[in-house]
Image (cartoon, coloured by chain):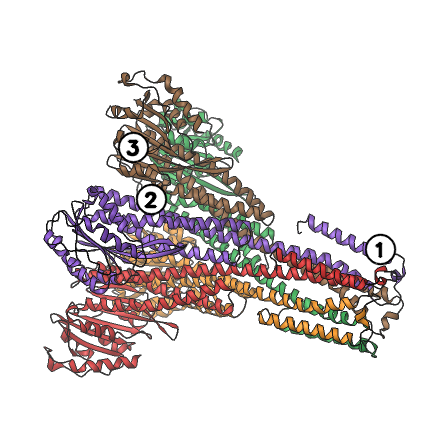
Chain colours: A orange, B red, C purple, D brown, E green
Amino acid sequence: MVRHEGKESFAVDNKAGKNGADSNRLHAPEARPGVIAAAVYQNGKRICDIPIGDAHHWRQKENTVIWIGLHEPDSVLLAEVQSEFDLHPLAIEDASHAHQRPKLEIYGDAMFVVARTAHMMDGEIIFGETHLFVGRGYMVSVRHGPSTSYNLVRQRCEASPAALAHGENYILYSILDFIVDNYMPVVEGIHEEVEELEERVLRDMLDKKDIERLYLLRRSLLRLRNAIVPLVDVCRRHEHLELPGMDATLHTLFRDVTDHVRRVQEDIDTLREVLAFTFEASLMIGQSEQTEITRKLASWAAILAVPTAIAGIYGMNFVDMPELHMRYGYFAVLATIFIVCGGLYRFFKKARWL
Amino acid sequence: MVRHEGKESFAVDNKAGKNGADSNRLHAPEARPGVIAAAVYQNGKRICDIPIGDAHHWRQKENTVIWIGLHEPDSVLLAEVQSEFDLHPLAIEDASHAHQRPKLEIYGDAMFVVARTAHMMDGEIIFGETHLFVGRGYMVSVRHGPSTSYNLVRQRCEASPAALAHGENYILYSILDFIVDNYMPVVEGIHEEVEELEERVLRDMLDKKDIERLYLLRRSLLRLRNAIVPLVDVCRRHEHLELPGMDATLHTLFRDVTDHVRRVQEDIDTLREVLAFTFEASLMIGQSEQTEITRKLASWAAILAVPTAIAGIYGMNFVDMPELHMRYGYFAVLATIFIVCGGLYRFFKKARWL
Amino acid sequence: MVRHEGKESFAVDNKAGKNGADSNRLHAPEARPGVIAAAVYQNGKRICDIPIGDAHHWRQKENTVIWIGLHEPDSVLLAEVQSEFDLHPLAIEDASHAHQRPKLEIYGDAMFVVARTAHMMDGEIIFGETHLFVGRGYMVSVRHGPSTSYNLVRQRCEASPAALAHGENYILYSILDFIVDNYMPVVEGIHEEVEELEERVLRDMLDKKDIERLYLLRRSLLRLRNAIVPLVDVCRRHEHLELPGMDATLHTLFRDVTDHVRRVQEDIDTLREVLAFTFEASLMIGQSEQTEITRKLASWAAILAVPTAIAGIYGMNFVDMPELHMRYGYFAVLATIFIVCGGLYRFFKKARWL
Amino acid sequence: MVRHEGKESFAVDNKAGKNGADSNRLHAPEARPGVIAAAVYQNGKRICDIPIGDAHHWRQKENTVIWIGLHEPDSVLLAEVQSEFDLHPLAIEDASHAHQRPKLEIYGDAMFVVARTAHMMDGEIIFGETHLFVGRGYMVSVRHGPSTSYNLVRQRCEASPAALAHGENYILYSILDFIVDNYMPVVEGIHEEVEELEERVLRDMLDKKDIERLYLLRRSLLRLRNAIVPLVDVCRRHEHLELPGMDATLHTLFRDVTDHVRRVQEDIDTLREVLAFTFEASLMIGQSEQTEITRKLASWAAILAVPTAIAGIYGMNFVDMPELHMRYGYFAVLATIFIVCGGLYRFFKKARWL
Amino acid sequence: MVRHEGKESFAVDNKAGKNGADSNRLHAPEARPGVIAAAVYQNGKRICDIPIGDAHHWRQKENTVIWIGLHEPDSVLLAEVQSEFDLHPLAIEDASHAHQRPKLEIYGDAMFVVARTAHMMDGEIIFGETHLFVGRGYMVSVRHGPSTSYNLVRQRCEASPAALAHGENYILYSILDFIVDNYMPVVEGIHEEVEELEERVLRDMLDKKDIERLYLLRRSLLRLRNAIVPLVDVCRRHEHLELPGMDATLHTLFRDVTDHVRRVQEDIDTLREVLAFTFEASLMIGQSEQTEITRKLASWAAILAVPTAIAGIYGMNFVDMPELHMRYGYFAVLATIFIVCGGLYRFFKKARWL
């Protein structure tokens, strides 16, 4: 996945450097490891790709936004980004090692947003983490782990320059929307597995493999929930954030994201509860199964005890056992055994023990 | 169901076009797919049916409300409606594909309401979704899935023109009230099933089919709850909404709807808890059942072990076994067996193991 | 119960019509079905009984309150009451069919209160519903279901005219206090049953009847809780209600009711939790019981397998079995069997399996 | 316990009546039943003991506080106290019969506080109830049930006159602090029992007695929790109460009590959760135990089935059974039996079934 | 651990006494038991170590902060500290005996902070408690139990004098940050154990030792949670605390600590839920295991009952049993037995009972 990400920064290379105000400073896009893309947009149009070190030249310009996409940058690269945009050291420290809670923090006039991403790969849920530094005139996204690249977001944004002209906040919206949208197929994938498991549990007792599956689904949902719940809060705060460039249009867009993320959360909560029901149904089915087996066992034990007991008695070696000398005594006993066993069989059948 | 909906728009056709201010623009009602009804009301009276494309002519008039009912409209139809009423693109996007959370959103001076509907069909709960666009002088309802048509609401509203003269907010109230009312028979249907299951669980152990029924009831209640809980919030917000035309009378009506929806929620919560009790009672009954069977099994095993053991001993082939040569030895042993078995039987009976 | 209610309205008849300001309008009390009592009080003293239709004559007078008690009135009667006191149609609609959530609603300067009542009858909890219309100078109580009559409340109020002189709010307090007080014996009745069940569960495994009892107690507590919890809210709101005639004294009285109803709720919650503990203890006892039985079964099976196996061996028909020809061989085998069985018995006894 | 309480009121008798402003009104302390102590303090020093009926003479004085301790007073005594201090009838009604929720109520310029007390006696938790009437210049404590006397509190207060000079609020603090402190040994006692039970549950399956113990501990903790949780609220409200004589020092003291009572609550909650874990661990241990037994039973049944089956076959009476006539046939069969049984034994041992 | 702590106060001795304003008052550092370190910092630089008794001389100076580290001080030492810094008696009382809830309390212009610490030692979680007295110009830390010394914090602070120049609030931040950081390896340690247990539970039934491990992990997490949850609140309050010297920089730092502590809490909650899933999975696996065993037991019992029953019949001693005299009768019976048993075996194999 990461391999493909490299491509785009070359692909868009041709478009770059056209109407840049500072075109003499224009460099070829860096193939620098960790940098996925770094471009300058004016009025919603990509005007050039820049090396990280040139970012500060572009920050002061009107209607201009620098959008840099990093993937697991090393500390040198992060330090450079920090100095270009005067980012807060604590935010940079957080960004340097993944495993943060999703959150939104304001440092002066800059925003630091952490979100967890999820996508399916080979039937496994892969979690990643994205850190976003957003400030007047720039957006730096830092991805950790094997998350999906945001080049798709970039392409979509570039496809609607009017919207992109809203600047960094629109990019922020686009990325959050993309992250939340990517949760949906994951949740749907789990949904299908849950439904399969449901059918199974109602058909028969779960075997060990099903129980393991059930267990792992519950864990996955727990992790998804941990990723989503603080994100709801992050999105909701954006709805009411008073920042330069955050107008009613953007607030409406963020409200839409909040709505999506809450629906994802509702779906996750529903699945969690369904799995709890599945657990309880499985306990009941198991108990009912065991009772059934015990009943069957008891019934057959009773039926088979009859020939054993009767035969045992006529196997005794007493000298004086009159039945033994009767004619057809043997056949009478056989008949008795069959009749009693048959009677018991019918009795248990009627009682639904067999 | 959809077939019948078409009828009404013809039936009311005769009444249309009487005192319309703009009667020269009057068209025959469209048999257009997706449009269930589209009519203009002035002071609570239906004055004509209109094609969607004429809606904008009627929007500016005093005391006039356009009420359009759509069912799973295609994107062309939705786009037309959007342009007629200047609806917000995000709301239209939501309306174009079902599966939204119940919600109330304000876009400028327009309102977008999403509700989930439920009704019973052949013993199954059928869920649908309704999206309502409400603004000054218009109400557009968009139904998704096999929900009940709102023609009944329309008939009721037309039957009380004084109330309908309140305009779009009264229609909104009527539809929400109708949706909530339709939940009641669904909940009652589940209620009956739950009571049946309750009786069963206390009479005997649940079999697999009962467990499946229990499981499915819990799922249904979960889905109902997911549909109802956000609706409570939607209704409650209407109680205090400050919109043009929202007077104290309407607030009181909305409070009444809130009250109904909360009662439905309470009923659902009660049923959920009752089913949880049922689950626990079933576990206990099952455990008690199994203990009883094990006790019976043990008792009979003990009783039947007696003839086997005694007969076995006298079946041995020792040369010197004095009992074997006694007169009536055989009968004495038979008697012993009967006495011991009878004693054990009485013992277990007393101990309530049998 | 309803039979007795009729009596009071006759009994108090004699007192009526003494110092009524409008005594010429005084009518004999109606034996009208649905009307339990309808009287006018001035400065806390009952001055006359009136037919419903005369109520509006008394409403405007100073220091006068009309107190009407209805039981399952038909729609005609309700309509009459509505027109006499200008009651809100929605409240009347609610009052006409029972099964409302306990609530307090303000319609203009009138209050509509719904409460659920409970009392024990023949060991069963009987739920009823009371709707109260309270406004300046009147109190109309509408009982549904077999609830206790409020004549006792009336008698108590009439016994303290100074308090009753506070008017309709004091009557409201008295009725709510009476309703809450009536919950207490119900909760205590359940409390006793729970304690009985507790003892039982710790003594032995619960049988099916106990489990049913446990189940039904949990359901009853759930229903009680549903009735009580919204009532807490209703009472608490009265503590701070700013209405004409609601002074600090009444607020203190309502605070006292709130306190009582909260204690009832606490008791219910405690009982619910105790029953949950009982369920869990029952599961544990059941499991321990079953383990014990299985152990016993296994022990006896082992002990009884010894004679069967040994006797089986010496029952074989081999020509050459030297033991069979030994003197006392038989007795030696018998002794061996006894010793081995006895040893096993002692072994299992020591291991506490027997 | 009550016997000892009587002593103190005599013991302090000697100190009384020294610098009382009104020393001519001084009476010998009453040995009146229900009155534990009744003394007047000026500037933190006990100046005399008084009969209840003299209290009103002392109420108006500056820097004076009357502290009366009652134990299960009869209605006559309560009425007298009420009239001396103008206590609110509702508070008096509450105080006359125990079983109130812990609460803090303000009646005009007087406070009514209810708290539940707990102490251990012979391994049992004894619950009591204390009602406190606090107002300008007086503190009346009413104990119900076998709670610990507050003479210890009185002694401590008298030992620090500077603090006691703060008046009735300081006494209130001292009593609440004492009540909360007395919870600690109770909780610690339960803590020890819980730890004992924990060890037991991990060592072996719980027997019926342990299960009963577990059950009773859970109930005790529930009762303690019910007593403590509303007390947290009572204490917290004192932290911010604006009353005459309630200064920052006292607020700090009350904050300290709140802190203690919250720690007690935390301990109770922890113990409750630990017992829930114990229940679950016990279920697991029980299940594992039962599986083990079933495995053993199955293994031995299989082993013992071998001689029975083989011996049965050679016990048949067919005329033509060649093995029976073989030399050493008998011994060969015996050997076969031993080998097969031994093999099975080793097999089950390896599989950890034995 | 405590032994090593002593070292540092000597080690830093050399640096002391250089640019102290009051160098004539400079003493050698005390080897006094309970005092780990006591130093004065001016503008972020350690200028000298002081005996406790000299602290008041340094308190009034500008840009000066006294940092004293105590470990389980006796009451004499605590009293001395109290008088030097005018600490509130209640705080000192709390500090003298450990086992407080984590909390933040303000006494006038001083702050009292309680935190619980945790670290792993030999696979055990060791809990400690730290009490911090923070006021203008001083920080006194009091450690209880075997917690990690704060000399590491001191070293780090001394390494960045610019930060330390912020004074006591920066030290407070550093200590809280250190405490929270120390939780992380503890939680990670538990995390690893939980994962081990997870694998085990899905592979096989848990044995007693695993169940004990599971139980103890749940208890540990409960204790950790009790330590962490109030700490979240303590840290969050610091974010908004308006104290002298608490500027935006410090608020940002405290926000960072809050963030860390919340992540620890989230991790703990996740582990708690995972262990609950583990418990449920274990129940299911156990039930499935037991059903399997019962099935096997029943199958083998059925198979082995065949030879016993048939052999029993032909072991009877009837005179007239024609089969006994047939040629090959014996072999026919043997064959029958084998065929029936084999058939049953295949039957059970197919039904997956074997």
Chain identifier of the residue bearing label 2 in the image: E
- Look at mark 1 in the image and give the residue it sits on: C332
Kindly check if marks 1 and 2 are in contact, taking CB atoms under 8 A apart as contact: no
Disc 2 versus disc 3: distance between alpha carbons?
A: 54 Å
Residue C132 in percent (x, y) is at 24, 55
As drawn, the label of residue D253 is none
Image vertical order of residue A158 relative to residue A231, above or below = below
Question: C145 and D337: which one is in front?
Answer: C145
Residue E239 has which mark? Answer: 2
Q: CA distance from mark 3 to mark 1?
A: 91 Å
Q: Residue D79 has which mark? A: 3
Say whether residue B264 is left or right of residue E117. left
Q: Nearer the viewer, mark 2 or mark 3?
A: 3
Tell me residue D139's x, y (percent). 31, 30
Label 3: chain letter: D
Q: Amino acid at mark 1?
A: Ala
Using the image, name the chain to which the residue with label 1 belongs. Answer: C
- Discs 1 and 2 carry the same chain letter: no
- At label 3, the amino acid type is Ala
Judge left or right: residue A202 versus residue C52. Answer: right
Q: Which percent across, then down, holds residue E259?
A: 38, 49
Looking at the picture, which amino acid does disc 2 mark? Answer: Glu
The part of the image, by quadrant, that contains residue A183 is: bottom left
Check disc 1: other Cα within 10 Å, few if <14, some if 14-19, many if 20+: few
How many other residues sit within 10 Å of disc 3, few (<14), some (14-19) or many (≥20)?
some
